[in-house]
């Protein structure tokens, strides 16, 4: 993922709302969300190059999402893929904090990343750039390619717009997807300097990214209700053109309901 917006305990009937965009090169093959043949019955997209994923949720409601930490000056060219972190964590028999603590032992071998993981409204954040496990408080949070709630323009704007959506109607998918389609570009003086040059900082600055070679490939909404239902909706963008079609999953896993749609 490149942008994760979270509402933790945003309403009396919802434990968690997640709205996220995954950005990638259009040439990198990707499979949309589907159930993996895994012990935890994980629903996730798949990077078909490294065969990992950036976000997933199990039938029991345990979820995890990962963003890269953008620091071009400290790239490890031989680092292992970060795509196995999510499947390994969701399949772990350990509690989320214990599983993250175990991950910390080898986290330095990876290039920089952030991890958000939890169940219901019990959510944790970890970064191998920061090396601490933080329980996230109720409220609105945002994560891009730096640390949690770093006030990059896209994070600040996304959190403000998510707050507005949740105040109006936390069940309105159209409003949340409109949020994730936001292409506002801030002024140059507000942009971070992550070592990629000003032109690319401009390209990567909106919530929804489009360029000739790289852009937002999927937008995903996850809701976990107080009574344990899981609702997932995904829009995929295999090219800068129109989104893909609709796929639906029956509510057959622990009274969970999954819908993948354009």
Image (cartoon, rainbow, N blue to C red):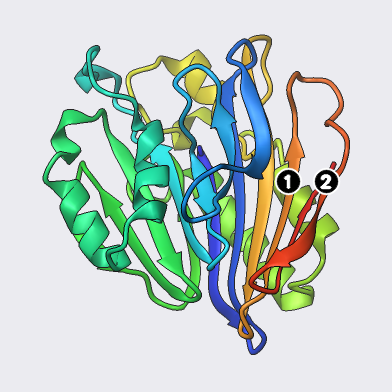
Q: Is residue 81 above or below residue 12?
A: above
The crowd level at tag 2 (other Cα within 10 Å; few <14, some 14-19, many 20+) is some
The C terminus lies in which quarter of the figure? top right
Q: Is residue 61 above or below residue 235?
A: below
Tell me where residue 213 appears, x and y as whole percent: 63, 10
Q: Is residue 132 left or right of residue 38?
A: left
List the single residue furthest toward the left: 105
- Observer-nearest residue: 171 or 164? 171
Residue drawn at the location 25% of the way across and 58% of the way down: 99
Instruction: Say which element carries label 2.
Output: loop
Q: Is residue 104 above or below residue 236?
A: below
Q: Is residue 153 visible in this depiction of the protein?
A: no
Tell me where residue 2 appears, x and y as whole percent: 50, 37
Tell me where residue 37 appears, x and y as whole percent: 55, 42
Q: Is residue 257 visible in this depiction of the protein?
A: yes
Residue drawn at the location 78% of the way across and 71% of the way down: 171
Looking at the rendered structure, which numbered label has been put on residue 234? Answer: 1
Tell me where residue 209 appears, x and y as whole percent: 64, 29
Q: Which residue is mark 2?
A: 261
Residue drawn at the location 67% of the way across and 86% of the way down: 13
Q: CA distance from mark 2 to mark 1?
A: 5 Å
- Observer-nearest residue: 41 or 110? 41
Residue drawn at the location 53% of the way across and 68% of the way down: 60
List the single residue furthest toward the bottom: 12
Instruction: Determine whether label 2 and label 1 are within 8 Å by CB.
Output: yes
The crowd level at tag 1 (other Cα within 10 Å; few <14, some 14-19, many 20+) is many
């Amino acid at each position: 993922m490149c942008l994760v917006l979270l509402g933790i305990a945003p309403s009396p009937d919802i434990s968690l709302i997640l709205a996220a965009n995954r950005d990638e090169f259009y040439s990198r093959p990707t499979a949309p969300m589907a159930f993996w043949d895994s012990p935890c019955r994980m629903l996730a997209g798949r990077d078909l190059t490294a065969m990992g994923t950036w976000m997933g949720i199990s039938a029991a409601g345990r979820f995890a999402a990962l963003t890269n930490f953008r620091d071009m000056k400290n790239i490890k060219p031989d680092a292992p893929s970060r795509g196995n972190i999510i499947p390994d964590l969701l399949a772990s028999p350990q509690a989320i904090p214990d599983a993250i603590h175990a991950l910390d032992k080898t986290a330095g071998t990876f290039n920089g990343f952030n991890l958000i993981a939890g169940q219901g409204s019990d959510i944790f954040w970890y970064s191998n750039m920061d090396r601490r496990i933080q329980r996230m408080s109720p409220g609105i949070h945002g994560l891009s390619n730096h640390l949690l709630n770093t006030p990059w323009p896209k994070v600040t704007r996304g959190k403000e717009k998510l707050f507005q959506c949740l105040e109006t109607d936390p069940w309105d998918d159209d409003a949340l997807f409109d949020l994730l389609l936001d292409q506002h570009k801030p002024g140059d003086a507000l942009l971070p300097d992550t070592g990629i040059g000003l032109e690319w900082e401009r390209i990567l600055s909106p919530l929804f990214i489009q360029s000739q070679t790289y852009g937002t490939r999927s937008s995903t909404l996850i809701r976990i209700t107080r009574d344990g239902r899981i609702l997932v909706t995904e829009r995929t963008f295999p090219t800068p053109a129109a989104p893909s079609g609709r796929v639906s999953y029956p509510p057959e896993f622990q009274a969970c309901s999954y819908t993948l749609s354009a």
